[in-house]
Amino acid sequence: MGDSPAQIRGARLRKAVLDATLARIESAGIATVRIADVAADAGVHETSIYRRWKTLPRLLLDALLSRVAEEIPLPDTGSLRGDLERFMTDLIRFAGTPSGRALIRGTVIAESDPEVEAIRREFWVRRLSSSEEIVRRAIARGDVAATVDPRLTMLTLGGLVHLHVTQLDAELPPGLARDAVDLVLTGITAR
């Protein structure tokens, strides 16, 4: 049983459009992306994009979420330390690439367009909610107390990388994944 021609076209269309959207975000910033330009870059009709995504914000959200899911998958090593270190290592690696830097900056820097702002918020809410699963699994396994805040944990770790990329424009220090996870797992107060 092979894919039907419509499914292949659908998968190829989605990939071509998302790749073109991401290239636009990376080269010129999220606020400059226009469906007409994406359609031209992807070699498809604008109507094909509108039929599938309906609006530019939905297209932007799909493109950003799909790239981040590919580049920074949610690990399941069986241990909280392993999962957090793998997550941070992947995030740091991605943040060190030109496209990673551009995407991180493009999802942080404020724009005046309310639609773009709405999509930026939706991206972070969805991405944060999915990454919190790492901590929720650890709570379920009994690795950490049920009172541990999954959102605070992931904001602390992810926010560290994002701050480096968006505000400090510095090379991410070697050992940052391990050191940050150690800090979060150990805390900073003497026992």
Image: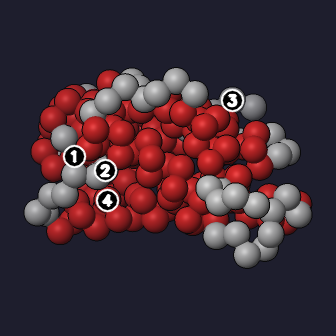
The residue that mark 1 highlights is 30
The residue shown at (37%, 54%) is 61
Across and down, in percent, residue 19 comes to 36, 32
The residue that mark 4 highlights is 120
In primary-sequence order, the first of circles 3 and 2 is 3
Amino acid type assigned to the residue bearing label 2 in the image: Thr
- The answer to whether residue 29 shows anywhere in this view is yes
Whether tag 2 and tag 1 are in contact, CB under 8 A, the answer is yes
Task: In the rendered structure, find residue 123 and report the number of the disc placed on it.
Answer: none
Amino acid type assigned to the residue bearing label 4 in the image: Arg
Across and down, in percent, residue 129 comes to 56, 63
The residue that mark 3 highlights is 2
Across and down, in percent, residue 85 comes to 67, 38
Whether tag 4 and tag 2 are in contact, CB under 8 A, the answer is yes
In primary-sequence order, the first of circles 3 and 1 is 3
In primary-sequence order, the first of circles 1 and 4 is 1
Amino acid type assigned to the residue bearing label 3 in the image: Gly
Q: Residues within 10 Å of mark 3 (few under 14, many from 20)?
A: few
Q: Residues within 10 Å of mark 1 (few under 14, many from 20)?
A: many
Amino acid type assigned to the residue bearing label 1 in the image: Ile
